[in-house]
Amino acid sequence: MNATLAPRIWTRVLELAGVLMALGACGSSGSDTSGAAGAVTAAGFSCGAGSSTAGVASGTPPSLDFDVLGDDKTRMLQSGTPFHLSFSVQTNSPDKVKWQILSYTGATVSSGSINVDAGATTATVACSSKMSGYFSLTAQLQAAGVSTPERGSRPAGFASFGVLPDFSQVLPAFPAGLLDSHRFGLQGTNYVQSGVCCTGNGLQPINQDLGSRWVLDSLSMATTEPNPTSVFDPTTWSLYEGLQQGSLARVVTLDGIPAWASTAPTPPAVGSYPPASYPQYQAYTALVGENSVLVQAQYIPRQQKNYYQVTWEPDPGPSTQWLGSDSQFVELYQAAWNGLHSTDPAAVVMGPASSQVSICSNWLNRLAPEGLSQYLDAVACHGYYASGNALDTAPEDVDLPGQMQSLRHTMTQLLPSGEKLFMTEAGVKYPVGAAYTATYPTAQALRQHAEVELRTHLILLGEGTDVSFLFYSADYATDVGYGLYFNLALQTAPYGSPDISPKPAAMAVATMTRLLDTSTTLGALTQTPIGTYGYAFELADQVHTVTALWTHNAAFSASATYQLQVDSPGTSGSVVVIDAMGNASTASYLNGALTVNLTEMPIYVLSANVAALTPLLRTPEGYARTG
């Protein structure tokens, strides 16, 4: 280990030791207690004795409903804060509620039982946890044999919640900087604060919980001037409530020209058509640029640049398919670029936002001879590696790393060096043909969903994406399973749900963002066995490195042992290893190398000798962190 860097990482390791003793092993399990309301828990997880009301007689059939309630209506809880298990019971005779809390691996971390009288009873159990991650509460009436029913997109039999990781004793503290330096965005709103779709701030607390800082804000003509009599006034247009706090960066989307201002053959025609007047469109984008300058000054002063995405999935297939010529497409970008830059000196015009990484390369290569490159200040794509990114196919199976390398190469050939790359949408849905049912998704499907979601964004970032947008916040009726959260109000709120609970993917994402946000990509490990992957990221202090590692096979059952270089040859010491759910431990290394056991779920290694690691890395072509 570099002697000048050693004190900082050793201090962190020593501070962490006390935390780890409190946390214990994540795989520990409790056992059911007998009698009334006791609980047995794993180290780091605490649940007390339950309390219940006296039963109130009624003649309804036996039923059981339960939930986990705490300091956050998304059911993602801060480490160490109190929460409670809430049970609503209906029985015709005395019975017992047997409950247990499982980690994402299926290990029992707490369990107990509550005696209930005949009639309607409510019961609660007080808990807290310093063990982070995804948890499911399962419960059943022992005699009646009933459990909680299916709720929205969440199957029957359990309630989900999460405990966010606390890295205050693990990671160095960084001062607040420009919003532009953050690396994660999110699509989707959820109105948990108001409890009513779609009232109030739908961006918080979900962006804060997931660790995302970028959102999309539509200022398309179809949004602001849906008919010829409506006129967009940049000085009076109301900024969305969720953006007014100034803690989120915005990408303004411009796709969508209303029928009256486009060349669409009929008003309901599907697809994206060229504007009827390019000068009119340019004048409109100039107004958008004027609005962004005002918004930046009043609400979001920590966002240095204003980012504009002109089109949305223009490739054949989506309903947004471009139905003009290639030259008209370039003319559209020329008009937008001229209009935006005429009023906004901080404008960054992006596109084409095609539906897959490989298709994005094709668009850039095809339209460069037409002049598109000169009207792109950055590249925006959607980070799908296959059609729809269904769980049937993992990103490694179709060589997403290679797709990204091809895109980066295309950018270096056609665009000035240092231009940013945004993936403004990337997510993973359940397998083709899946449906929300009382028995699906299974626990195994949820684990695989988390694994693939996490690895997709790690590859995108590790191969040179500057900002990667998560898709989607909570499940919706179509495209089954994209949500990071279950939508518990699916039938009444297919979008913008006011009632959600996390999947394992949400908790894995919350760990990834807290470790990698504001980092700089160092690149991919080059000396890994086939099927093993690793990407290193330098933290903002330019001292610490986080390396993400995993292995994969077609059966989603891979395991491997790997030696990661964390320090100079001949040295020994300890580093911090963090699992996908944010639980940290110390691990010893010899001769500068750490031996790690890898599975399909990524882990992270925090080390403090960047120089020892960088010779083993392949830096993304043309990648340069800016702004």
Image: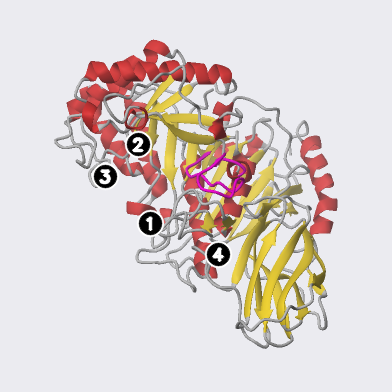
Badge count: 4
Q: Mark 1 and mark 4: span between their CA atoms?
A: 31 Å
- Type of amino acid under label 3: Ser
Residue holding disc 2: 353
Query: Few, some or many C-alpha atoms within 10 Å of disc 1 (few <14, some 14-19, many ≥20)?
Result: some
Which callout, 3 or 2, points to the residue nearer the camera? 3
Residue 433 rendering spot, x and y as whole percentages: 35, 66
Residue holding disc 1: 479
Residue 48 rendering spot, x and y as whole percentages: 83, 67
Secondary structure type for disc 4? loop
Q: Mark 4 and mark 2: span between their CA atoms?
A: 35 Å
Residue holding disc 4: 559
Residue holding disc 3: 319
- Type of amino acid under label 1: Asp
Q: Residue at x 35, y 20 (%)?
A: 285
**Residue furthest out toward the left:** 265
User: Which stretch did the figure color magenta?
Assistant: 185-205
Q: Classify residue 454 as left or right of residue 107.
A: left
Which callout, 3 or 4, points to the residue nearer the camera? 3
Q: Answer above or below: position of 331 versus 240.
A: above
Q: Mark 1 and mark 2: span between their CA atoms?
A: 19 Å
Q: Mark 3 and mark 2: span between their CA atoms?
A: 14 Å
Q: Mark 3 and mark 1: span between their CA atoms?
A: 15 Å
Q: Mark 3 and mark 4: span between their CA atoms?
A: 41 Å
Q: Residue at x 78, y 36 (%)?
A: 8
Q: Nearer the viewer, residue 542 or 484?
A: 484
